[in-house]
Image (spheres, rainbow, N blue to C red):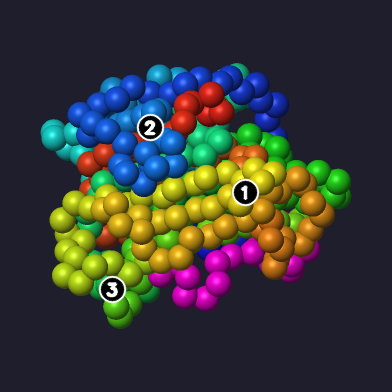
Amino acid sequence: MSRAIFGFKIFGVAITLAMAAGMTLNAFAASAPPEAAQAGYTTNTFSSSFTSATVDMKNTKNKGFQWYLWNLFSVQANPAGVVLNSDGTVTLLGTSQFNGQLVTAVTYTATNTFAGTAFGGGAYIEAEMQFDPKVVQAASANGSSGWPSFWALSIEGNVAGRSDQWPGQSAGYVHSVETDFFEADAPQAKPPGYGGAMHDWYGIYNKTCGQGLCQAKLSNGAGLRVVPTGTDFAQFHRYGFLWVPATATSAGYAKFYFDDQQLGPAQDWQLYTNQPPPALGQPWAFGVLDQLHMFLILGTGPLQPLTVRSVNVWQANGTSNLNY
């Protein structure tokens, strides 16, 4: 989404976070994909189709659901834009301005905490989706500001108040990572592909870097994920993101996958131990991801339907996840 709007904060909340191992396996997740298994991620900690039992369509914000209606940056998703289909898929119609209709975690004001799940400690994250690129291209030509998207933000600083404070910096100096697993933001790209990127956001909003937040991002062109010749986006495909944290002896990295095939270069980083800013150009840029807990987001732009069949997360285990 590469927009500095993510510097906005939901009102400050004191939050107690409980750890849990996650969700159970369903029919869409018979085994871990090879790229997940190779990284040691063979436990299916989250597996979801889309029904009234898994999606909080009434916006109760109660625990027990896997998906909640987007409620970030002073915008509440309209449930009319979320269509639960009889086959367990969901079709998103793009009634929110932030490419977000469904999230795996939402602020729960009744107890000053949150409902849902955020993922930590590394993971392979995958969604099976379909969309019509011709419709997206037409919307883009007409000035639409949105597009089909599968992405994540840290619960720190977005759902959990100002918990993204950069240690040792002035009050309000934040630091977090946005991960964009898939964005249909290049409908006219040649060769055809989609966006898959990361953004290391930092600074004091509207102060350190002028408007919005400062950011370190992937090098020019690295975010375009070129798909195999003949790919039909109108059919279901699997869009994956592999996150392996850094250690004292090995680099952390992220890779993007399309139907089990890696697309584009990996992004790596050295161990991040709260080094001082700026993150730009540093070997540990993006490394703060390893300290964060990411909640998943599904959304699309106006008049650009996105149908999602399943979302799965594989990890070594779920002990680093936050679940309420």
As drawn, the residue found furthest toward the bottom would be 190
Q: Majority secondary structure of the magenta segment?
A: loop
Quarter of the rendering containing residue 233: bottom left
| Mark 1 or 2: the one toward you | 1
Residue identifier under label 3: 192
Q: Classify residue 218 as left or right of residue 181.
A: right
Residue 156 visible? The answer is: yes
Indicate yes or no whether the magenta region holds residue 275.
Answer: no
> Which circle marks residue 250 in the picture?
1
Secondary element under disc 2, as helix, strand or loop, is loop
What is the three-letter code of the residue carrying label 2? Thr
Rounded to the nearest whole Å, what is the CA distance between mark 1 and mark 3? 34 Å
Q: Residue sitting at 27 percent across and 59 percent down? A: 304
Q: x%, y% of residue 178?
A: 55, 52
Badge 1, how many Cα within 10 Å: few under 14, some, many 20+? few
Question: Over which residues does the magenta segment extend?
Answer: 205-224
Residue identifier under label 2: 42
